[in-house]
Image (cartoon, helix red, strand yellow):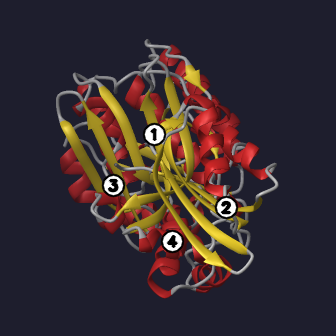
Amino acid sequence: MAAQPLRVALLGAGVVGSQVARLLYEQSEELGRRIGAPVVLVGAGVRDLQRARGIGIPPQLLTDDLAGLVSRSDVDIVVELIGGVEPARTLLLSALEAGTSVVTANKALLAQYGAELHAAAEASGADLYYEASVAGAIPLLRPLRESMAGDNVRRVLGIVNGTTNYILSQMDETGASFAEALAEAQALGYAEADPSADVDGLDAAAKAAILAGLAFHTRVRLDDVSCEGIRGVSAEDVAAARAMDHVVKLLAICERTSTGGVSVRVHPAMVPRHHPLAGVRDAYNAVFVESEAAGQLMFYGRGAGGTPTASAVLGDIVAVGRNRVSGARGPRASAYAALEIVGLDEAVTRYYLALDVADKAGVLAVVATTFARHDVSIETLRQEGRGDDASLVVVTHRSTDGALRAVVDELRGLDVVRAVASTLRVEGE
């Protein structure tokens, strides 16, 4: 290999960064053959030099001067794995503006400032790759961006957060409450001490923004994503889903609407057990893509973890290296469509509702009239008496989310309705 070495600067040497460094050293010869040039790690930026000792990176390569590392003239590619918006945004903009290519796994940064990063890459001719930002090791973004570039994607439906999928899987398999399943996930290391980003849906929402942007050639920001987490999912909800031969999943849903816009949302939903996503258990991820020509495709695998995510990062490093050797550039951002991002009210879905109602004549008629008033059709209705009160379970046909939520708001104000005990959307049918 006569080509000049590809010199890599690594930002972050934690769970993923340390594995990237290990693989760079262990597979350097093989990676060099695949790229057509040697790959050399020239520096690793960390926040705390003392904590970074003993992770397998030569001490002389470690530095806490991240800005200085990024600005070095002998760096060809910056690999960012520190996470968060700042200082990652400033560091990567500095690299891209100087013409240094970037590989990142930072979904939060891309979901908020992806347009800015792409613009900087375009202006300088640098590459910007981020396969590892969504679904870890699963090859997903590149197929959406490249393999399906000639197709029209209609819908992307996926489980993109392993922590919440583990929690919901445990609730389904053992009957555990949300709190019990979360505690187990934390004990096993699947959930952080502060699990908010996962259980409140924020992590999945950032990934949904990235997926929607690629699928629909439209700039989608985190603020465009309607987001609801799983804290409100009860053991009773999971049991009700099981009784309907469904399972509860936290879904990221990106789809074209009948009006030509794009709906992007994250929320828990009941999924029929015959759907491929229903069988995705524990901390695994899976994304179901529906397009006009290819039809239905599913991508499945480990969505997180040091080594799986490092695999995706290494794949991007190889892609950037090959571009450099051949004098080519990677794919540019494709946001030509500029489709309207519609709110949750316009999304079309089905609902499951559990109501506590007075057990007396005329209640069913009052409830049914409320649904009809908002033009929401009832698919199934089941009532079970309990003394002075009764439990009423309703599953609707497809309607706009706004109409369904208007029904729920009105039901809560009816004298015959003691409580709206549970509401869940039903997807995948």
Q: Which of marks 2 and 4 is in front?
A: 2
* Residue to which mark 2 is pinned: 361
- Tell me the tag on residue 260: none
Residue at position x 29%, y 23% from top? 328
Q: What residue type is labelled 4?
A: Ala
* Residue to which mark 4 is pinned: 240
Q: How crowded is mark 2: few (under 14 residues within 10 Å), some or many (20 or more)?
A: few
Q: Which of marks 2 and 1 is in front?
A: 2
Q: What residue type is labelled 1?
A: Arg
Distance of label 3 from label 4 (alpha carbons): 32 Å
SS for dot 1: loop
Q: Earlier in the sequence, mark 2 or mark 4?
A: 4
Q: What residue type is labelled 2?
A: Ala
Residue at position x 45%, y 43% from top? 397
Left or right of 91? Residue 319 is: left
Distance of label 2 from label 3 (alpha carbons): 55 Å
SS for dot 4: helix
SS for dot 2: loop
- Tell me the tag on residue 138: 3
Image position of 6 with respect to 262: above or below: below
Image position of 300 with respect to 216: above or below: below
Residue occupying the far front of the picture: 361
Q: Earlier in the sequence, mark 2 or mark 1?
A: 2
Q: What residue type is labelled 3?
A: Ile
SS for dot 3: loop
* Residue to which mark 1 is pinned: 398
Instruction: Residue 64 in the image: state x and y as whole percent.
Output: 71, 56
Q: Which of marks 3 and 1 is nearer the N terminus?
A: 3
